[in-house]
Amino acid sequence: MYQPNLRNLGYFIGLQILFQNITHGATHDSAERHPPPKCHPNTRKAIVNDIVQWTHRPLGTNESRIFWMNGPAGVGKTAIAQTVCQRLLECDQLGGSFFFSRMVPGRNDPRSLFATIAYQLACLKRQTIRNAIEEKIKEDPAILEKNMTLQLEELIIEPLRLFDLATPPLVIVIDGLDECLGETTQGEIVRLLGSISQHRNLPIKIVLTSRPEPWIRHEFDTQLLLPHTRRMFLEQTSDTDEDIRMFLRSGFTDICSAPDHQRTMANVPKPWPTPSVVDEFVERASGQFTYASTVLKFIGDPSNQPTVQLDLILSAARASKIGNSTNPLAALDRLYIQILSTSLDKRKTLDALGAVIALTEAIIEFQFLMIYSASACRVMEELLGLQPEKALRTIRSLVEVSKDGEVKFFHKSFPDFLLDASRSGNYFIDINVMHSRIALACLKTIKLDPAIALHSLNGEHAGTVKSHAVGCWDIHWMLSLVSDQDHLCDEIKGINASLFHYHLAQEWVHEMAVTVQRRLRQGGTGITMPGLT
């Protein structure tokens, strides 16, 4: 998080300081999330209307302040939250939004939650609110480094006291609370939001979405929140099935008319696919829009013929008895397995996916690593000898590779599937082993050119694979649960010998010793490294 130079504070104004402390990619209109998931036209209308109508109701003694929409993975909570934001914008009621994402560094960090919301409030056409927030930050810039309780009170509650209670309340939308780092922190955020209910003259309502995790539900069941919360649990209903059916029909129409498929689909009998096939997908979706969305991405892959892709999915689904399972994730798991089975080299595909998860996990656990870390594709190519474009080519319905070499999962249920052996079976990824492989690859890179250790400590090679090797190897080692300690220590000893040969050892070995021992204590492994103490 940015820390303003207080000596040069005269160069800043309050909002400029605040701007440097927000999570830019977490808002409803951020470039990072574009295009954001949103409800297909004419779907989820009843749910969206219910939430929006609730936001319109004036605050009163018995009116709830928080709308908690919860449900399992894949039912479309984020799309609904995005659509609600758009509707609230139209009626000038959106105060701010924050879309958490477990797999995106920054968007999983709660420390910037209230700063990000405060910035959006300050950008509204309410000069009194803007002035109050700006003056608070100019008066005490350190508020942005203080705890969430103080930030909520001074950056949101106090400025909103100046807002006219007679107008429709402003609404703050927070999506994916369960993707915020730390169960304890998730509970703290719920309690803090619940404390808003104690301020009866505060013109604000909260829309919050999450999975129904026990620790989150526990907070909503307390006396602080129970009387002031409206709840909605998203589950499979006839309305949901009809929405998914409409979503699929529209998606298949788009595939037929897409430039990549117009010629090959021109002579295919319409409607395609048949209504019975669409009904089959609806049944297997079990209320999960993620299933339907993944089906459309796979069938609409520009590199393949849609009719062939459709047959692949149908043949695999019909060959299994998954459809009769009471587990709502069973059909989605089978779909993931079917898509992964199209890989020409299963091992390399899983290695590439495991590397993406491991690299993301390392940055999530230790966000300062972002200054060292290279893009996922460069790490895979130069450290692990993988060709990510080739390894991931057949599963583009599950992952996206950006132009700058980063890899993003379309939905968090996919990495959840890969890391759960009971769900993924032969496609299970042992993330501890992958961390160990990356740690060894980092050490071997340092061993080939020991001088980069000192150069990287001095800030050289930032954002390169060499910088990643020096700055991140011990994190990967720690996260591997030290499954290959002897091999790793042999590599370290080899590096030490090379460094002494270069007369560079003393500084780097001391830095490495201090850093590793500190991180190992944090990880609770309780081991020491030979030659480093």
Image: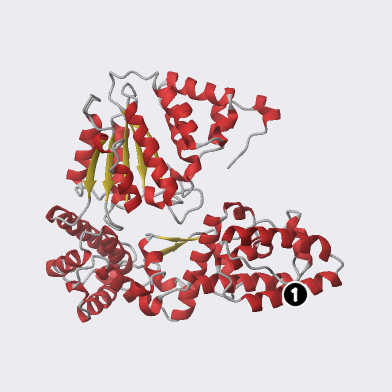
Can you see residue 210?
yes
User: As rendered, which of 91 and 368 lies closer to the eye?
Assistant: 368
User: As rendered, which of 132 and 403 lies closer to the eye?
Assistant: 132
Amino acid type at image mark 1: Lys
Quarter of the figure with residue 318:
bottom left
Q: In the drawing, does residue 364 fall left or right of residue 306? A: right
Tell me where residue 6 appears, x and y as whole percent.
67, 30
Colouring method of the image: secondary structure
**Residue in the image at 62% along x and 70% along y:** 439
**Residue in the image at 29% along x and 21% along y:** 167
Tell me where residue 129 appears, x and y as whole percent.
43, 22
> Vertical placement of 9 versus 508: above or below?
above
> Vertical placement of 150 versus 461: above or below?
above
**In which quadrant of the rendered image does the C terminus lie?**
bottom right
**In which quadrant of the rendered image does the N terminus lie?**
top right
Residue with the mark numbered 1: 493
Tell me where residue 472 appears, x and y as whole percent.
63, 62
